[in-house]
Image: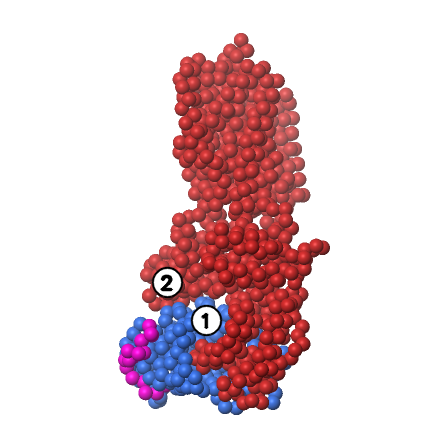
Chain colours: A blue, B red
Amino acid sequence: MRFPGQGASSTIRQFALGIAVTLVVMAPGGALPRALAASAEPLLNQLSDRLLLRESLSGQFRQYKHLPFLEQPFESSGHFALDDAGGLRWQVEQPMPSLMLVRDDSVTLDGKPVKDRGTGQLITLIMRGFMVGELDGLLRYFSVSGDLDRTPWVLELKPTGRLSAVIRGVTLQGDTYLQRIEILEPESAQTVIEFCDVHPGATPQDAVED
Amino acid sequence: MLSKTKAPLLWCTATAVLLAVTALCWPGPGWLQTDLFALLPSATDSHWQKRADHSLTQSYESKLLLRVSAKSGAASQQFLQQITAELTGAGFLAPQQQDLEQERWRALSQVLYPYRRGLITAQQSAALRDDAEGFLRQYRQYLHSPLGASSLNTLPGDPAGLFREFIEHAAPGMATGGNDGEVVALSLRAERLGLQRLEALYSMYLDWKSRASGQGLLFQASGPPLYSAFGVHSASREISTIGIASLCLLSLLLVLCLRSFRALLLTLLCVASGLTCGLLTTIVMLQQVHLLTLVFGATLIGIAADYALHYLAHSLSPHWRRERALATVYRSLYLGAFSSAIAFAALALLPFPGIRQIGVFMAAGLLGSFATVCLLFPALYPGLTSPGRLPAFCRFTPGRQRRWPVLAALLLLLPGLALLTPRDEIRDFYAAPPQLEADENAITAAAGAARDSRYFLITAASPEELLVTEELLLAQAQQRPGDARLSAISQLIPAAQTQRNNAELLARLAAGGALSAHLEGLGIDAEQGREMTQAYRQTDFNPVTLNALSGLSLPTGTGRFLGCRADSCASYVAISGAATPRQLAQLASDVPGADLVDRVAEVNRLLASYRVWVVALLLVGGLAAGAVLTAAAGWRSALRMIFVPVTACLASFAALGYLHGQFSVVNLLALLLIIGVSLDYAVFRSLTPVTEQAATTLAITLSACTSILAFGMLGFSSTPVISAFGQTIAIGLVAAYGLSWLVPPGGEASE
């Protein structure tokens, strides 16, 4: 079996670009111009009104990653918790247990500090935004459009600036809670995170300080 | 003496020649310097160190760190975006600047990718040797977390994430904003950091501070461009303040004492011609002039006016005749101007580029003013229309005062002189506004982004030895206590042997099935896994060499290979973090071929050696001036004249001892100027007949007032090096003026 473009210069370029972008992608400066941000604010305010806002939140997640070189999606599942200080606990149970904790600028994986290339902060930003209704933060990285009249509502995020080199777009769906995040990446890769059994409050074992 | 028509013609011809020569020799853009280090001599003769200094300076001097902290991260981000946009709009920042950096990393990754089997960090290598299964299991966990999503795309070419980690490890730590802030590190466009624009940068900084405060944000900024911008901002303000204040005082004094508008215009002409002559001569001879030289040059106004004042003051004397006006003062003007010019020209002998500029500027300026007085004044100044009258204080006869109180006062100088200790610290010279210093400390504390001008210079006989030495240094730094973060070229191109060892390690893991098992653990079927690990199973491997980097523009902050000459190769390893000098020195001493270069310490050592040189120059200059004066006026008069500058210098240093307790080469250089000016006073006094002493008293008084005020104002400069210079001279000139009353008049001396 031969992987698409393996050994070819296109793969090298793609690989190099991925590394280069993640080295600088989350630095400030690539976010949305203010004029665009202003036009998206009514939509986000409207969406914010539809959300059940909570101090803390927990639930189950299932993550699929479709990769062009794999026939089966790359899959993991577990449960998550967001606490009132904005910390995220992401407990993977299947296929192999691991625990990611995101707090302020620090991210740990199974107790060891790890380099966050921005993904941890981005997911935390999105999830916390939908939990407390502070969706303005999305405008730092995306232009926003959507259809809020249907159920579940759909929000389309188009990355602006350097993030567009690694993400083609993000689609969010939900009702009173965020239910689904779909991230489209270059070269047909796609990540889907689905949330279920979402409920307010975090159990004591979900505390991010653990 | 030349006739009234020939003399102005000669002045005009000389001016035209100077302008023509300047036009022919004009150096073009870049003739005006602002970098403080440009004032200093090169601290090293080492070819490699000069190249490393140049390379580091280029990357370091344009760095700007901005930090905003607020309760809301969005507000911080938005504010930083506004600032970035404003910097781009003002031309300081290239559009999409971070994309350029991204492009550098992309190009570098592309070049290194084919050699990835040998490119593993020392930590990865150790972890794989100790517990390969544990290492790979941890990577699988990482891939299953949201953090690993982007790494999954690179799985076919980099199944264990080793190459990605290798590249990220080579990237110097991206500054973070701490827990409550956002930080952005920018590289400003070097070509836009010119004089005119730098002042605008400082104004922008002040505006950001004010706006952030209004929005409830805390804004901090740091970086060499801001310090330069502050230097330009304060220097240009001081040039205008000192220049205008000097001119205003001069005008006021002249109008009050000489009561002639023409006298005022001629004095201004004398000053202007001195400044122009000084500036053009410096540019023609040295092809450049520093901003601080111009600041210093503003004080030429006070000295250049001396000659005009000496000429004009005598017009108030009842014995004054226009035909003999120049003859009356010529000898004292001539000796005063040339002795001062020689004193300043002596500065050009010192190996300080900045001091050399000042010496040439002042010597040429004084001679220009002297020539203007001698060639233009007799033709253009007819004297007062009504008989003038000298102020009452001018009737006091000099040289009649009791001398024992002076001797007693001299005894008071001794404790002050005993209190003095030398201090040679270049950082004392630099203007560091408290606001910027506080910002820098805060950013360093929050973001861990301490700037460091120190580096390790690595030299070896071959590129391979060079890389081996770097790797040894990195390994030693890793094991030692202290937070020395190093960026070396071997983090991008490891030694060939290291690469081969890495490739062998991966080949063993691939052959043993560890990599295939790892991929199966990720749900990838066996056949696909074999395909992915095929490249790693190969035993032949050609390491990448430093040549692969030629033609690449390397990302900011990475180490640099400086090249090879006939017998040696060199590179530098950049340092960040908070390692102490002792820790770094120990590290360098333990690794043969690695030398710690501390540019600031080297410059300080130079300052100390030049302090000794200046003392020697003062002694030689004093002896030379004494010899000239002895030949011109006899040894007794020469001793009386020399007494004034020597005692004025001692008085100035004694005052420094009482006030600060420390002195540096700058204070010593100020003594040269005190000698030049106070010698004028003594010469004017000593060579003027008793009958003309009243006019001389007026001339010396007017000169002293303007000079002391001009230099006294320099003493309030926010640039410490200028302030120290101004204070020393102002104190010395006060003493010189007082001492000039002790010098007996010429007629009396000869009697």
Image position of A89 with respect to A64: above or below:
above
| Spatial separation of the CA atoms under disc 1 and disc 2 | 22 Å
Image position of B389 with respect to B425: above or below:
above
The spot of residue B393 in percent (x, y) is 41, 19
Give the left or right position of residue A78, taking residue A200 as reference.
right
Say whether residue A206 is magenta.
Answer: yes
Q: Provide the chain ID for the residue under circle 2.
A: B
Image position of A87 with respect to B186: above or below:
below
Which image quarter holds the C terminus of chain A? bottom left
Instruction: Give the residues in magenta.
Output: A195-210
Q: Can see residue A124?
A: yes
Image position of B693 with respect to B536: above or below:
above
Dot 1 corresponds to which residue? A115
Which image quarter holds the N terminus of chain A? bottom right
Task: Kindly identify the residue that appears in the image at 58 percent across and 63 percent down.
Answer: B471
Q: Nearer the viewer, mark 1 or mark 2?
A: 1
The amino acid at mark 2 is Ser
Q: Mark 2 falls on what kind of element?
A: strand
Q: Can see residue B374?
A: no
Front in this rendered view, residue A125 or B83:
A125
Dot 2 corresponds to which residue? B69
Q: Mark 1 falls on what kind of element?
A: loop
The amino acid at mark 1 is Lys
Say whether residue B554 is magenta.
Answer: no
The spot of residue B85 in percent (x, y) is 46, 64
Instruction: Estimate how packed mark 1 is, as few (under 14), some (14 to 19) or many (20 or more) residues with alpha carbons within 10 Å.
Output: some
Q: Residue furthest right?
A: B566
